[in-house]
Every structure is written in C-alpha cells, then in structure tokens.
Amino acid sequence: MTSTLDTAIAKLAALPPQEQERVGRWILEQLRDEEAWAERFGASQNVLGRLAEEARADRTAGRVSEFDPDKL
C-alpha cells in the first residue's frame, strides 16, 4: 500500500462509524463504476476501430469538411 493511501485510511479510521460507512460505500461505488467503464470501453474497441477507419476513409475521399467552432 502506498503511503498516501495508508495516510488516507488512517484518517478515515478516526471518523465516527457512520461516516466510515458512508465513505466506504462511496469508495466502493466509485470502484464499481470504474470497473464497469473499463469493461464497456474494452468491449467497444472493435466498433471504435471501425468508426476510426470510416472517418479516415471519408477524410481521404474528401467527404468531410474542417470543423470551425466559430460557425456554430
């Protein structure tokens, strides 16, 4: 464990039990969200690769125009 995480856990351990529960639930929720995002992103690599190939082909064929945010 890193010293930063060790320090954070020591500070959390000093909190009242209800606050420890609240923070613990929040941390676990964040970790679950991160795992879900990584899984979804990993599963989408084939689709993203195909879309990138299509975009490059469209650009090469002249079927795209430059983006100008001032013209929005």
Image (tube, rainbow, N blue to C red):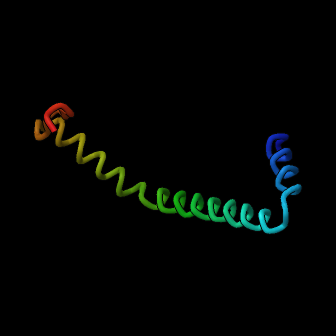
Q: Is residue 20 above or below residue 60?
A: below
- Quadrant of the snapshot with the C terminus: top left
What residue is shown at x 11% (from left), y 36% (from top)? 62
Occupied quadrant, residue 21: bottom right
Q: Is residue 25 left or right of residue 12?
A: left
Where does the image place residue 32, in percent across and percent down from the top left? Answer: 62, 64
In front: 56, or 1? 1
What residue is shown at x 30% (from left), y 46% (from top)? 52
What residue is shown at x 62% (from left), y 59% (from top)? 30
Q: Is residue 36 left or right of residue 50?
A: right
Occupied quadrant, residue 12: bottom right
Occupied quadrant, residue 66: top left
| Circle count | 0
What residue is shown at x 35% (from left), y 57% (from top)? 47
Where does the image place residue 45, in percent across and percent down from the top left? Answer: 42, 54
In front: 30, or 14? 14
Where does the image place residue 42, in percent across and percent down from the top left? Answer: 49, 57
Q: Is residue 16 left or right of residue 70?
A: right
Where does the image place residue 55, in percent across and percent down from the top left? Answer: 23, 44
Q: Is residue 15 above or below residue 68?
A: below
